């Protein structure tokens, strides 16, 4: 499958393992306490979670030491930085052998030149709909805006991706799209994913890409 799948906002053991059975490529756990999908201070990843699914910890303007501790304890493959983290902070994480996904919040005023200073220190960028809540809005931004991006770093597409609009991802087929990131668009309630919807997205990606 060319375009990979990330399922974010996971926190309940049973739902984590049910989603894992669909075999997404990435699974995200949110460690931002103001999020409706906050995994919790004492969260631990179920030992039964397949090692083939890459583990992503989501942070917002968090202290570097805290991010490193979480990453070590939970054996995270990547950290996803949703706030105003600097290129220097990304560099420090890379020097600790941690993968970095830097998030940019997109609206019509976004200047894609801002991504260039992060190119040396990010494995991937993630483009999400601009909001005050740092993601999880269920709202889709205008994907045509991605034509302004220089495509230098592979990116993940986020922001209201759902079974209803996944077909439209075809319009990005000539871009450096690495994965789609689903969250609220496949939920029954915050933090709980509808397995049928996740499976539908996975099958659509397999059949179309």
Image (tube, grey):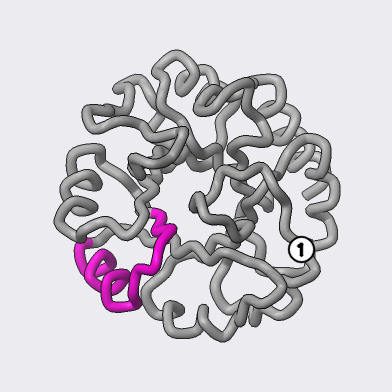
Residue at figure coordinates x 43%, y 84% from the top left = 117
The stretch of residues the image draws in magenta is 80-96
Query: Which of the 4 image quarters holds residue 46?
Result: top left
Answer left or right for 146 relative to 41: right
Q: Position of residue 195 (x, y in %)?
A: 64, 20
Residue at figure coordinates x 29%, y 22% from the top left = 47
Residue at figure coordinates x 18%, y 51% from the top left = 66
Residue at figure coordinates x 73%, y 52% from the top left = 140
Q: Is 94 one of the magenta-colored residues?
A: yes
Q: Is residue 127 above or below residue 134?
A: below
Q: Is residue 209 above or below residue 47?
A: below
Q: Position of residue 169 (x, y in %)?
A: 79, 53
Answer left or right for 126 relative to 33: right
Determine crowd level at label 1: few under 14, some 14-19, many 20+ residues with C-alpha closer than 10 A. Answer: some
Tell me how many marks there are: 1
Answer left or right for 17 relative to 7: left
Q: Secondary structure at mark 1?
A: helix
Q: Is residue 63 above or below residue 43?
A: below
> What residue did someone put label 1 on?
143
């Amino acid at each position: 499958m060319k375009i990979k799948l990330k399922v974010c906002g996971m926190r309940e053991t049973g739902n984590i393992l049910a989603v894992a059975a669909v075999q997404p490529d990435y699974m995200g756990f949110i460690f931002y306490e103001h999020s409706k999908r906050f995994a919790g201070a004492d969260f631990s990843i179920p030992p039964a979670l397949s090692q083939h699914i890459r583990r992503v910890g989501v942070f917002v303007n968090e202290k570097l030491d805290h991010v490193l501790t979480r990453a070590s304890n939970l054996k995270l493959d990547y950290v996803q930085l949703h706030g105003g983290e600097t290129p220097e902070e990304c560099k420090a994480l890379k020097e600790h052998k941690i993968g970095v996904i830097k998030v940019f919040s997109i609206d019509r005023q976004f200047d894609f030149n801002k991504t260039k200073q992060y190119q040396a220190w990010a494995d991937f960028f993630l483009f999400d709909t601009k909001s005050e809540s740092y993601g999880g809005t269920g709202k889709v931004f205008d994907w045509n805006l991605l034509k302004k991006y220089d495509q230098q770093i592979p990116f993940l597409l986020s922001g209201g991706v759902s079974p209803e609009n996944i077909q439209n991802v075809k319009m990005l087929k000539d871009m450096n799209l690495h994965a789609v990131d689903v969250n609220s668009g496949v939920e029954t309630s915050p933090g709980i994913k509808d397995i049928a919807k996740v499976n539908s997205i996975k099958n659509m990606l397999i059949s179309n890409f």
